[in-house]
Image: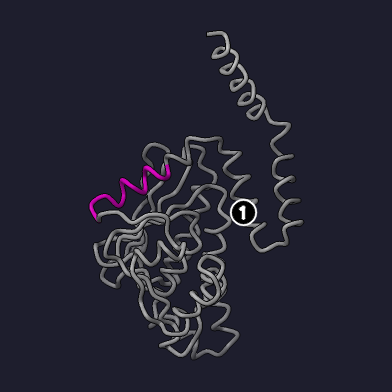
Amino acid sequence: MNTLTPYDISGGIATVTLNRPQKLNAISYAMVDALMNVLDAVETNAAVGAVILTGAGDKAFSAGADIHEFSHSVRGGPAIAVREFVRRGQTLTARIESFPKPVVAAVNGLAYGGGCEIVEAAHLAVAADGTAFAKPEIRLGMPPTFGGTQRLPRLAGRKRALEYLLTGEPFSAQRALELGVINEVVPRAQLLPAANRLAQRVARHSAQAITAILTSVTRGINASIGEGLHIESEQFARLVPTRELVSHLENWKSRRTRKASH
């Protein structure tokens, strides 16, 4: 069974849909592997400037990892559980976070566990009004394993993140907005149009500059300010020899000259 809807490209935006609605789009191993393959294909597709990631159906973006599946790995012991489950999930969220094109999560329903971790890893996120988020892993006697103990504190702050990590209690889309997990809350009917508008607002700019910014932020956010500034300088230096940067600068100067002459 397909775990992803074949992705659609429209206006330079690729929309990828998690497709297990009967399981609340629970993240199976096959879904992770399929999503990694799609990201590989999209990265090298020059026709794609940004990615929207959403869920099938009207109930869930994703309810989290497929518990029935990963419980088999747990029974195999620590080495198997880490290799099959933890590394797979962490590799996916790291891939999304470091993806060189903007990834916008369009949260169409509940985003629990691994689903919430995908949203945390995405560069930008829009959620439908009435959706819910949660870090319920503690109720299973375990911590989050797809990066949730690391990214949520970085987004929301230590104490606010620990409240949800340690209680497992859900929080609203509005609270997710306040915590910095998402960028916008919109009426459900406007979710995909709003996500598309956000993606278009970004993708209209230089692809090289977008990648430089994404790389600088992703690599620099966990570094010291000195290291971060070095990364920023390094990314700028990579653009200096390019014709695209020269062209943008010349176009700007030309516009300024024309305005001054009027």
- Asked whether residue 144 appears in the rendered view, the answer is yes
Q: State which quadrant residue 132 falls in.
A: bottom left
Q: Where in the figure is residue 107, as x and y percent of width and height?
A: 35, 60
Q: Is residue 53 above or below residue 199?
A: below
Q: Where in the figure is residue 118, as x and y percent of width and height?
A: 46, 64
Indicate yes or no whether the magenta region holds residue 226. no
Apparent side of residue 165 relative to residue 98 in the rendered image (left or right) = left
Crowdedness of circle 1 by 10 Å Cα count: few (<14), some, many (20+)?
some
Apparent side of residue 152 relative to residue 230 in the rendered image (left or right) = left
Q: Secondary structure at mark 1?
A: helix
Q: Quadrant of the N terminus?
A: bottom left
The stretch of residues the image draws in magenta is 188-199
- Asked whether residue 85 appears in the rendered view, the answer is no
Q: Main secondary structure of the magenta part?
A: helix
Residue pushed farthest top?
A: 261
**Residue that appears at 60% across and 39% down:** 209
Q: State which quadrant residue 246 falls in.
A: top right
Q: The disc labelled 1 sits on which kind of residue?
A: Val
Q: Where in the figure is residue 153, as x and y percent of width and height?
A: 54, 71
Which residue corresponds to mark 1? 217
Q: How is the image coloured?
A: one colour
Q: State which quadrant residue 228 falls in.
A: bottom right
Apparent side of residue 237 relative to residue 139 in the rendered image (left or right) = right
Indicate yes or no whether the magenta region holds residue 191. yes
224 or 41, which is in the foreground? Answer: 224
Apparent side of residue 236 relative to residue 217 in the rendered image (left or right) = right
187 or 110, which is in the foreground? Answer: 187
Q: Where in the figure is residue 213, as x and y percent of width and height?
A: 61, 46
